[in-house]
Image (tube, rainbow, N blue to C red):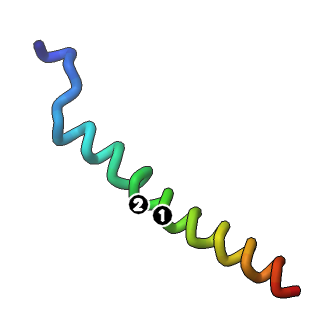
């Protein structure tokens, strides 16, 4: 039981990852649109 990761700890690890994915996606889309315009 003590060796199992707690939900709180899991969320702490997942939050930064989940937070960076949309930011990276928007940056990628912006680059795509800028590239198409130029």
Q: Which residue is mark 1?
A: 22
Q: Is residue 9 above or below residue 19?
A: above
Q: Determine the residue positioned at 73% across, 79% down.
A: 33
* Mark 2 element type: helix
In the rendered structure, the answer to whether residue 34 lies left or right of residue 8 reads: right
Hey, which residue is sitting farthest front in the picture?
Answer: 36
In the rendered structure, the answer to whether residue 17 lies left or right of residue 13 reads: right
Q: Which residue is mark 2?
A: 19
| Marks 2 and 1 in Cβ contact (< 8 Å) | yes
Which of the pair 18/26 is nearer the observer?
26
Which of the pair 15/3 is nearer the observer?
15
Mark 2–mark 1 Cα distance, whole angstroms, equals: 6 Å
Q: Position of residue 6 (x, y in %)?
A: 17, 31
Q: Determine the residue positioned at 77% across, 82% down.
A: 34
Judge the density around disc 2: few (<14), some (14-19), many (≥20) Cα neighbours within 10 Å: few
In the rendered structure, the answer to whether residue 35 lies left or right of residue 18 reads: right
Q: Position of residue 38 (x, y in %)?
A: 88, 86
In the rendered structure, the answer to whether residue 34 lies left or right of residue 15 reads: right
Snapshot quadrant of residue 27: bottom right
Q: Is residue 7 above or below residue 22?
A: above
Q: Is residue 31 above or below residue 13?
A: below
Snapshot quadrant of residue 4: top left
Hey, which residue is sitting farthest right in the picture?
Answer: 38
Judge the density around disc 1: few (<14), some (14-19), many (≥20) Cα neighbours within 10 Å: few
* Mark 1 element type: helix
Q: Determine the residue positioned at 28% across, 47% down.
A: 12
Hey, which residue is sitting farthest bottom in the picture?
Answer: 37
């Amino acid at each position: 039981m003590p060796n199992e990761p707690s939900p709180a700890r899991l969320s702490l690890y997942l939050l930064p990852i989940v937070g960076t994915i949309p930011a990276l996606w928007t940056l990628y889309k912006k680059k795509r649109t800028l590239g198409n315009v130029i």
